[in-house]
Image (cartoon, coloured by chain):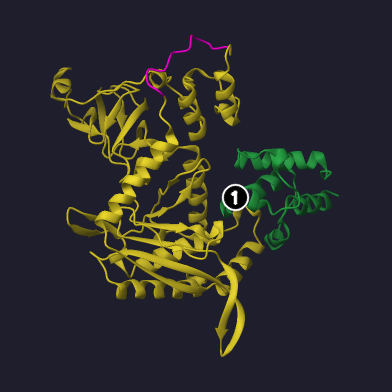
Amino acid sequence: MAEKYPQLRANVIAILRSIAPEVEADELRDDRPLRQQVDLDSMDWLNFLIGISEQLKVSIPEADYGRLVTLGNLLDYLRAKLG
Amino acid sequence: MFDFTLPSLGADMDEGKLIEWKVKTGDAVSKGQVVAIVDTSKAAVDVEIWQDGVVHELLIAPGEQIPVGTVMATLLEPGEEAPPKGAARAAKQAIARTPSVPGAAVAEGARLRISPAARKRAEALGVDVARLEGTGPGGAVTLADIEAAAQPGAPTPTEATPAAHPAADRNAEMRRAIAAAMSRSKREIPHYYLSETIPMARAQKWLAQINEGRPITERLLMAVVQLKAVAAALAQFPDMNGFFRDGRFEPVQAAHIGVAISLRQGGLIAPALHDVGSKPLDQLMRELADLVKRTRAGSLRSSEMSDPTITVTNLGEQGVEAVMGVIYPPQVALVGFGRIAARPWVEVGAVVAMPTVVASLAADHRVSDGHRGALFLAELRERLQRPEEL
């Protein structure tokens, strides 16, 4: 499966690795729930989204959290936000 | 003159290795100040002094492994005249010393920034972390730095010191420590267990409204709301909050809640979030975020290790319905939360989909009965129906 938006994906995974250093970029599947692949509790998840919103300069309302299940969802969402 | 001894840092810690002194002879110290960093089976801990004084003599050298209660230093009371040196050393108790070579060379001055995982890996590989230059954030020594330094032929600023002992495996040590504390708990504490399904619609709606208008850095987590609700309920149930020591129960007024925090490499630490009942949610959120970060980075304070008066564990994050916990001695209760999810719920004669959570209580029969425990859980349920009052 071709990976979406390689640069954006790399940036997002770098932020993820600052919270979960054990993550291997090429083992992550874009189409599976991220929190099933990486052990993230709600504090980790919040810190991950804080990292994204600060480094990529996007605001992520809490109401949108429910749409951000897979890495693919998140990349599509950010792509749309970043224009 | 008074002695500074290695304090107990929880039921599962009976010895520690001095990593570094943060003070030197002649320094004035004040109550609560961090004076030493001690490595335990679970984490490196910033050890605080419990009274004001002036450092007279440091008796333990970095790298020494010492049991809890060992006199580490002598201090003068503020204003006290110094007696001749050596007097204190003569009075020092005999202790078994096991100086460990790799850890003994920790540099003075700035604290070494290294994660527990990297520290563990360094011990396993016999890498002297004090001699590494970290490439991580703020000069932190990362796992990659350790691996690189352990490569044959890796450039080392000084000759590598051969490890005197086979490296201890921190994970195995932590597992042993947890097992010892939990075995003691199951041996000594007559547990009883209760659970209650609590509707969470009001709390979720309230929290969503609060967070809607806030930037992401100021949003609250439900975990904080739950912790505050536990503290509020504890105010009416002092028999769930405190310590059972020397055959009797010592209730504690303030709710210092031990928050079970899992470590990424495995294992668990439940350091105290202090005085939860008296702090607003915003402050608790900041303090919890800081506590989680420092727990994972291996930078806890001794009071956080020894103070918890009750533990709260939230295993709902991993998707379980409910958790029946093992009490962490000398505490007398543990509250567990499962996953918050929409479940069938009967309301005014009709079945509706309702977000609910199973809250459980493991408590100590030496101190309370199931009836009290049931009332406590009912109080917790009521508190969570009125989140705006938390």
- Residue B46 as seen in the image, left or right of residue B330: right
Residue at 47% across, 30% down: B120
Chain A pictured colour = green
Name of the residue lying farthest toward the top: B159
Name of the residue lying farthest toward the bottom: B349
Q: Look at mark 1 in the image and give the residue it sits on.
A: A40
> At numbered mark 1, what does the secondary structure look like: helix, strand or loop?
loop
Residue at 55% across, 20% down: B133
Can residue B77 be seen in this snapshot? no
Reply above or below: A38 against B374.
above
Quadrant of residue B216 within the rendered picture: bottom right
Name of the residue lying farthest toward the right: A83
Q: Position of residue B142 (x, y in %)?
A: 57, 29
Reply above or below: B314 against B54.
below
Reply above or below: B25 against A2.
above
| Relative depth, front residue between A64 and B207 | A64
Quadrant of residue B345 within the rendered picture: bottom right
Q: Position of residue A48 (x, y in %)?
A: 64, 47
User: Exactly how many numbered labels are in the figure?
Assistant: 1
Q: Position of residue B73 (x, y in %)?
A: 24, 27
